[in-house]
Image (spheres, rainbow, N blue to C red):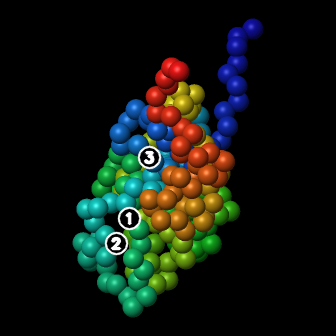
Amino acid sequence: MADTPPPREDLTGKLLIAMPDMGDPRFHGSVVFLCAHSADGAMGLIVNKPMSEVTFGEMLEQLDIPRGPDTPELPVCYGGPVELRRGFVLHAAGYRGRMEDGLRIDDRFAMTATLDVIEDIARGAGPAEALLALGYSGWGPGQLEDEIRQNGWLTADATPELVFGRPMAAKWEAALASLGISPLTLSAQAGRA
């Protein structure tokens, strides 16, 4: 009888927390929100790497979208190395805009990749909690599972408070703390005493 692989845990709606010795520098210190995970691969957005090249206001100008009096200064993140010119809005699932064009991830989170949500945000009618990511992080079949087995990532539950409510620079440590881990206990290198 052939060996059957263990059942794959669905990580949709979870966080990936980069270990200190993450081999890919693009993900060093990253917290990734997984929008989708299946046998076909995974897709997520880095939620703690602010883009220094562009602000939300500048992006609205580039898209010729007028700002309203209640336009928030939405955080703009580097979502990952794939399709850097494409924008994704990760937001609270309570937003009821044109969700036929969006992805409801679970009862707390949704993602929209259309201009409608950006126009709603600019008018002050968008989701109460949101962040904009340029680009995304993608994995092929089995690739993410291999990286987790090789201790490249820890997984944790995502909360709106951690994803939307924390300053970008505090999210990695907060995600570790949600697992009861102090960053000081993690080592980038194994050593000898």
Neighbour tally class for label 1: few under 14, some 14-19, many 20 plus, Cα within 10 Å: many
Which label sits on residue 56? 2
Quadrant where the N terminus lies? top right
Percent across and percent down for residue 25 are 35, 39
Q: Amino acid at mark 2?
A: Phe
Kindly state the secondary structure of the residue where label 1 is placed: strand
Q: CA distance from mark 2 to mark 1?
A: 6 Å
Badges 3 and 1: C-beta atoms under 8 Å apart?
A: no
Badges 2 and 3: C-beta atoms under 8 Å apart?
A: no
Kindly state the secondary structure of the residue where label 2 is placed: helix
Badges 2 and 1: C-beta atoms under 8 Å apart?
A: yes
Question: Looking at the image, is mark 2 or mark 1 earlier in the sequence?
Answer: 2
Kindly state the secondary structure of the residue where label 3 is placed: loop
Question: Looking at the image, is mark 2 or mark 3 earlier in the sequence?
Answer: 3
Any part of residue 92 in sight? yes
> What residue did someone put label 3 on?
29
Percent across and percent down for residue 4 are 70, 18
Q: Amino acid at mark 1?
A: Val
> What residue did someone put label 1 on?
76
Percent across and percent down for residue 139 are 47, 37
